Image: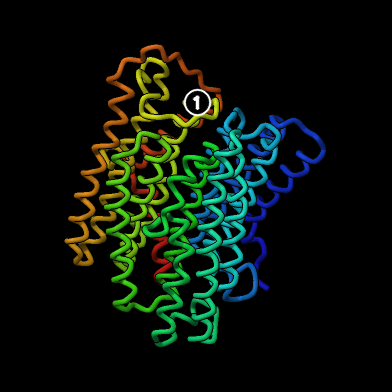
Amino acid sequence: MGNLELFLPEAMVLLGALVAFVASVVGLSGRTTWIISLVMAVLATVVTFVYLGAQGEPFFPGIYRVDAFSQILKVGVVVGLLLTLMMVGNTSSIRERSRPDIPILLFVASFGMMMLVSATEMLTLYVALELSAYGLYILAALHRLQRAGSEAAAKYILYGAASSGVTLYGISLIFGATGTTYLGAIAQTPSSPLLIAGILLALSGILFKLAVFPFHAWAPDTYQGAPHEAVTFIATASKVAAVGVLARLMFLAVPEHDTLVTTLLVLCVASMVIGNLSAIAQDDLKRLLAYSTVAHAGYILIGLVAFTSLGAASAIYYVLVYVPIVFCAFLVVCALGADGSNPTKASLAGLYQRSPLLAITLLVGMFGLAGIPPTAGFTGKWFIFTAALDSGMFWLVLVGAINATVSLYYYLRVIKEAYLTPPGELGAIRLTPMMAIAAWLAMAMVLVTGFYPRPVWELAESAARALVGG
């Protein structure tokens, strides 16, 4: 057995789930449960930061690795958890009787995601993958409008179950080809058609979580029908975990061969093109952000398919800064759709007059997604394109730059509605103190890492070295 102390960040998140569960069982009010859960999330975040430099194996050798790579991604997960919980306290898009259970589901899903980025054995990885998904499936079904929630959850579960089954079948093929489920041993096994097929199938479940084409079809409908706060968590923390396990598989268990690289390059380009072109036609803000997620999954793949330490670092940096960027956008969605309705572009009319804080939050979020300086979205794209150029993939950078330019159209249209369209009969919007704090906190993350990316970039570089070296 290893040093169990290394498991403390995950244990704190699991403890948060147990505390929230007990608070709900003993009959505490939803608000009291939320406050207790928020305190637990803050403690879990602090502990995760404290263990940022931890290294070792808390359990039996080879199944669970704690290193710079896993720890920085766990920070991304708990930050996504904390920001989401800050908005849950005053939600009305979730069924009233289910609101005390929301923190429990968020903690359990976060626990699975944190295990996912440390797993270095295929069955451990699969169990963590399922654990991270169950809470999200339930969250997607809890919209106050039962029909909308049921449709969103049904599509999410069906696609998730299908990709999970394919992933498990892929793992069986990998075991048949190599005789092992340990990623380190798989990496040392000679390549074979059976191994390549198994790896491609196993990756499908991860690509589903990241909403990469063609595993993206669930995203628009699920984003549209699920509660706003649930979608916020799906769009932030789950993406960090997905990038973590995808990178771990690609660099630890995947021999470099043309079939895999070609497949991922095709999915990368298709995700960027289809995501951006589909987003142009959307009026519903949540569907627009869903297709934007598909496009950003393509950008992240640019860094990973470089198969270099620089490429891995750029992908890690990108997904870390993506969390506060997309949170800014969804915070506006939650505020505008406080009654449970889905905001459209028309809902943004005169936002700069109705709520200046929301308007500037939306501006920062959209500029970050578009990659406009001085936001972290710009530095993220810069690092990813630099990594691709360093690997000689100029054509891929050109495709990415063209897609980033196309995305400017629909991101700036959102800004136009908020700043250049008169409010008409739409009234002022009042934010709760906690939502206002969350807005300022997320904007600070986006702008500070945009102006001064060095600390986060150095962490991403150390994480990439641990990944590639491992």
Label tally: 1
Percent across and percent down for residue 20 are 72, 42
Find residue 350 and report its horizontal and vertical position in percent.
35, 18
Outermost residue, front direction?
A: 147
- The quadrant in which residue 422 appears is top left
Classify the position of the N terminus by image quarter: bottom right
Badge 1 marks a residue whose secondary structure is helix
In the displayed structure, 31 sits above or below 5; it is above
Q: Would residue 462 be found to the left or right of residue 412 on screen?
A: right
195 vs 415, left or right, is right
Q: By what rule are the colours in the image chosen?
A: rainbow
Name the residue rendered at 64%, 51% in the picture.
108
* Residue sitting nearer the eye, 379 or 164: 164
Residue at 54%, 83% in the rendered image: 180
In the rendered structure, the answer to whether residue 6 lies left or right of residue 405 reads right
Q: Position of residue 49 (x, y in %)?
A: 54, 49
The residue drawn where x is 57% and y is 67% is 126
Q: Residue 79: tell me if it is visible.
A: no
Give me the residue at 42% from left, 35% from top: 328
Does residue 257 appear left or right of residue 206 in this picture? left
Circle 1: residue type: Ala
Quarter where residue 421 is shown: top left
Q: Is residue 366 above or below residue 351?
A: below
Toward the top, the furthest residue is: 425
- Residue indicated by mark 1: 436
